[in-house]
Image (tube, helix red, strand yellow):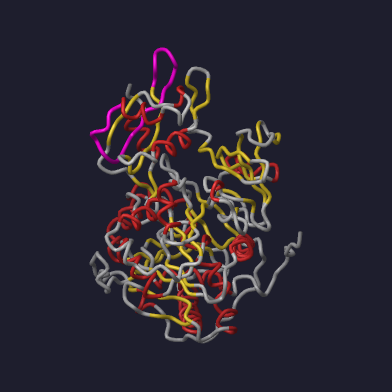
């Protein structure tokens, strides 16, 4: 396999200037919230100003730049500027409580912290609790009526005012591919998330894998549905689209009606989203009337997408398939082959161009059809976890990334994700994979979302409890009757509960751990 050398390379981090040199007048970014449009030449000029801002605040090669913000052009500036200067971007979730944010700030230890105005109070509270040295703070103005309001206090420099006027080329260091570009926190729902160390090499290789395996083009347009504190905000589709010279459309908040309108207005060709977002689009009043004919590729990631949702997209003539990734590797590891059969819709396809995958039990590959842990190997894997050697060895040791996900591979080479290793439970000596049960139950008309959790049972040790968002007139007898002939008896839930709305963590992703904590101990 071709590999970059480890020494200094002039191309490393040169995203904005290289693309601006090739396609200066092409639109690289659209802010759907304000209507502003930015060419690649304009993005490079903004990145040059942001680079000078970093240096004016003492940020050098290897220093951290943390940002707490929704998706905004200023966050794009900082991504491109940290790439240029060799500093490290650490986007942090604005959804975190101050104590959680304080722990991450301690880990990241940024030299500069950029905060969107609505989140300044919480971030200042986090800084007060943090043990790290106080970084320079700039406030990103909220002036676009995007659902929140707030001015930057007079004792905090505003991002716009702090930017130097000079937008000409900046002198940049010669970086190495293994230099860190991003610190991305994992989507953990218990304890403080780990900070994953993502190198320039990993960002580039994931981009190449995505372009080659998904068939991205230079005229592609994609609405960004993931937050930029998430690997999805950068590596799922944003950087690959910029790599090709396409257009990324961002907005502060997700709204299904606005997203449908964006697809139509901008002629979007690629859409990647979590299953909940794809379902909300199909449930929206504008779904039938929306012109989606420009969409060439739609992919679901971040959890299993229900067959019923996929069929609604297929009925519109849109090739929706499932993908698989994680912050620690990729995240774009699989692709569907040309002409893939619909009976493979519950799989994530085959490994991408420069990705190796295997399913193992105790470190040894298993036979086709056998469930085991999915391991991945690729130059787009992360380097490890920040300051956590034991966790790094457990996940990245031995040359393979241990995903913690259970999977199987069939005789045709299609990989199926069976669920998280930690989610599996044993009922009467038989392994039960909640994702399989959830997929069966989701076909019921009265079930919008479902999570199956284990609960104690005197006879069987553990049995499944179905937590349903949907028709609360459903009875356990209804569920058992529906599962008859669809699932083995030991897999059928023996308990039933309802929620008005599933808890979420990250970008509209169901927070399974929150469901387990609320319902898992109940009989």
Determine whether, in the image, residue 379 is placed left or right of residue 271: right
Closer to us: 72 or 273: 273
Q: Is residue 381 above or below residue 397?
A: below
Closer to us: 6 or 272: 272
Q: What is the x, y in percent for residue 137?
A: 37, 66
Determine whether, in the image, residue 272 is placed left or right of residue 389: left
Q: Is residue 74 above or below residue 166?
A: above
Q: What is the x, y in percent for residue 134?
A: 40, 59
Residue 134 at least partly seen? yes
* Quadrant placement of the N terminus: bottom right
Residue drawn at x 51%, y 37% is 420
Closer to us: 422 or 346: 346
Q: Indicate yes or no whether the magenta region holds residue 306.
A: no
Residue drawn at x 50%, y 76% is 51
Q: Indicate yes or no whether the magenta region holds residue 459.
A: yes
Give the image quarter of residue 142: bottom left
Determine whether, in the image, residue 481 is placed left or right of residue 344: left
Q: What is the x, y in percent for residue 378?
A: 67, 53
Closer to us: 245 or 158: 245
Residue 102 at least partly seen? no
Residue drawn at x 52%, y 45% is 346
Q: Is residue 371 above or below residue 245?
A: above
Look at the image and give the residue range highlighted in magenta: 456-476
Residue extending furthest toward the top: 459
Give the image quarter of residue 489: top left
Q: What is the x, y in percent for residue 169?
A: 55, 84
* Quadrant placement of the C terminus: top left
């Amino acid at each position: 396999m071709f590999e970059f050398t480890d020494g200094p390379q002039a191309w490393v981090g040169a995203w904005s200037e290289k693309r601006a040199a090739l396609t200066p007048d092409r639109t690289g970014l659209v802010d759907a919230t304000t209507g502003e449009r930015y060419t690649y030449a304009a993005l490079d000029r903004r990145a040059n100003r942001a680079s000078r801002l970093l240096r004016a605040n003492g940020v050098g090669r290897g220093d951290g730049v943390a940002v707490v913000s929704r998706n905004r052009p200023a966050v794009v500036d900082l991504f491109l500027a940290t790439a240029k200067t060799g500093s490290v971007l650490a986007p942090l979730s604005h959804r975190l409580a101050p104590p959680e944010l304080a722990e991450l700030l301690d880990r990241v230890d940024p030299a500069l912290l950029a905060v969107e105005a609505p989140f300044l109070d919480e971030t200042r509270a986090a800084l007060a609790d943090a043990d790290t040295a106080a970084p320079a703070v700039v406030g990103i103005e909220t002036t676009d009526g995007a659902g929140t309001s707030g001015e930057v206090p007079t004792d905090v420099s505003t991002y716009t005012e702090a930017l130097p006027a000079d937008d000409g080329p900046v002198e940049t260091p010669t970086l190495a591919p293994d230099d860190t570009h991003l610190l991305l926190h994992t989507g953990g729902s218990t304890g403080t998330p780990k900070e994953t160390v993502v190198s320039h090499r990993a960002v580039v290789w994931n981009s190449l894998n995505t372009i080659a395996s998904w068939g991205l083009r230079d005229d592609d347009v994609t609405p960004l549905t993931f937050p930029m504190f998430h690997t999805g905000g950068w590596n799922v589709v944003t950087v690959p689209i910029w790599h090709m010279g396409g257009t990324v459309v961002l907005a502060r908040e997700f709204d299904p009606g606005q997203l449908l309108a964006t697809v139509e207005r901008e002629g979007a060709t690629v859409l990647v989203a979590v299953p909940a977002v794809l379902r909300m689009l199909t449930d929206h009043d504008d779904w039938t009337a929306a012109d989606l004919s420009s969409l060439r590729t739609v992919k679901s990631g971040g959890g299993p997408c229900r067959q019923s949702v996929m069929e609604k997209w297929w009925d519109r003539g849109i090739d929706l398939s499932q993908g698989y990734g994680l912050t620690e590797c990729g995240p774009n590891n699989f692709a569907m082959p040309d002409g893939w059969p619909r009976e493979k819709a519950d799989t994530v396809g085959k490994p991408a161009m420069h990705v190796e995958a295997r399913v193992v039990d105790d470190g040894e590959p298993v036979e086709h059809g056998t469930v085991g842990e999915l391991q991945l190997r690729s130059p787009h894997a992360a380097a490890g976890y920040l300051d956590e050697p034991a966790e790094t060895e457990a996940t990245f040791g031995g040359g393979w990334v241990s995903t913690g996900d259970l999977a199987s591979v069939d005789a045709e080479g299609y990989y199926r994700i069976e669920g998280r290793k930690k989610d599996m439970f044993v009922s009467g000596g038989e392994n039960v994979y909640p994702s399989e049960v959830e997929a069966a139950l989701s076909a019921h008309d009265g079930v919008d979302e479902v999570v199956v959790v284990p609960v104690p049972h005197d006879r069987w040790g553990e049995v499944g409890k179905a937590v349903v968002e949907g028709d609360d007139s459903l009875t356990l007898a209804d569920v058992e009757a529906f599962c008859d002939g669809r699932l083995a008896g030991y897999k059928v839930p023996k308990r039933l509960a309802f929620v008005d709305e599933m808890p979420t963590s990250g970008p509209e992703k169901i927070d399974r751990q929150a469901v387990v904590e609320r319902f898992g101990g109940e009989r």
